[in-house]
Amino acid sequence: MAYHGATSYANYIAIVHNGVMQYSEENNNEADFEFCIYLYRRSLEYFRAFREDGDLWDKADDEDIQYYSSYLQMLYVNYANDLNRCGRLLQSISQLKHGVASRFSMAVGNMATKLITYAQYDYDIGHSRIFFNEAYQLLRETLEGALHEDAKLVFLRQKVWLEENFPEDFLREPYNFEDISLGETSEEKNYRMWCLENTLFLNTLNDAFYYSLVAHDCIHLPDIVTDIHVGFKFHGLFNQLKQEYVSARFMIYDGLHNRGGHYSDRDVFMYNTLDYPIYGLNIEMVKCAFRSLYSLFDRIAFFINDYFELGIKGRDVSYKSIWERRKGGKGGYEYALDLKKAMSGADTYNLPLIGLYWLFKDVGKKEIKHDYLEPAIKQIVDIRHALEHRYFKLHDSMFVPCEEPALSDTLAKSVDIDVFKNTCMQLLRYSREAIILLVLAVHREERLRNEQRDIDKFVAPMFLDKFEDAWKQIF
């Protein structure tokens, strides 16, 4: 029912709003798009629950499984299209991978169109060319399959566009990824393979490819034109964003994979509370990483406030405040720029920035019609609140919470280690998405500014050298 509700609501949006979102206070239809996405997410939850229910799955016959698979493939495609419309470019690609793996024609074709969009917003020309090449291979494949005529026409247009803009010898064969080493030690290789397989590298290619050549964090800010007195503040802030993300990523990996004890935990006396608690340096590293990842969103807001000149006072900047028009309450004031209006304007349209806004709706625990837009976010937010302000307690997966008040820890937010692991992985993906969307949004804005810049103004190039790996230590 949730799936049919979502598709029906999508049809309603297409008829009433022509599929176009409006963000102004006078004309705003975000709630309709929110409800549609919510229904797709609820539908996915029901599909997963059915698959994970051993009794129901074991009783399913071939016809039931085929029915399940067909609907799931259609769900992923429709959900991905809605996410893409909301600027969630990375999430859109992720949702199509299931259908592409099973060679579902609509998923293959839509993956091609999403990679083309992704490539058009990527500042790295080399990466864009690889995406365009891959999109062409996918379009050739899907056009050989059974398709609805309308879909076939859309995919054919995309294929013709690529043929008109790239030489035949470039499109003819798939891009050949060079095989490179993942590291000097088995520990480093295992870590990099984990990042690669879980799509955690700050590298746009990792959203579509899992080759060793992709296993590095190469993304950075595109060329930025500023007044001569501005300096390198944006690059400095972005350096810090990257460092905090990759450090948190490793702490989560190491904390969850390193099962051994640490000497810092020796002779630290504790009582056994009989509820299988987990203590130790490793798990504290993961908790610190969790808190660090959450702080990245406000740091990104700090970047956006300055780069887009929103005019929000430093103490008032947050991932929430940048999407508002004014500071309310006593001492309130109007902002210099309405970011939501700017990102959706005809001459200033910025799809990656819209994606950051819709990511905020998830991370910020946006409420819609008696639930959250992202139902799974409650667990992440509750864990963060307990870590920052209350009492968070991890348990071994064999632990079953005791319902007897005299024996249970009623002060704690108690979480199973497997649940915590999944929550950390989701937060890692949110953080990575936010950082990459920030880069794409800046690239889009720089292109817009370049179009509006006085052609008689002289722009002097200034180059920055690489910060060498050998310097990343305390001397």
Image (tube, helix red, strand yellow):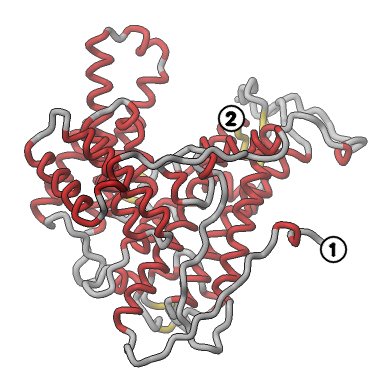
Identify residue for label 2. Answer: 418
Q: Residue at x 54, y 38 (%)?
A: 179
Q: Nearer the viewer, mark 1 or mark 2?
A: 1
Tell me where residue 6 appears, x and y as whole percent: 21, 40
Where is residue 38, by image quadrant?
Answer: top left
Q: Which mark is residue 475?
A: 1
Question: Residue 318, image x and y in percent?
Answer: 50, 67
Along the viewing direction, whichever of 163 and 376 lies nearer the viewer:
163
Question: What residue is drawn where x is 67% and y is 65%?
Answer: 467
Left or right, residue 468 beside residue 41 = right
The residue lying toward the viewer, choosing from 324 and 259, is: 259
Where residue 439 appears, x then y in whole percent? 45, 63
Q: How many residues crowd around disc 2 within 10 Å: few (fewer than 14), some, or many (20 or more)?
A: some
Res. 251 image quadrant: top right
- Name the mark on residue 181: none
Q: Residue furthest right?
A: 267
Tell me if 217 is positioned left or right of 67 in this view.
right
Quadrant holding the C terminus: bottom right
Residue 197: give x, y in percent of width and height: 51, 35
Indicate the secondary structure of the residue bearing disc 1: loop
- Compare residues 392 and 222 and report the one nearer the observer: 222
Of label 1 and label 2, which has the lower sequence position? 2
Residue occupying the far bottom of the picture: 456
Q: Quadrant of the N terminus?
A: top left
Q: Which type of secondary structure does the marked residue at label 2 adopt?
A: helix
Quadrant assignment, res 58: top left
Instruction: State whether residue 463 appears in this view.
Output: yes
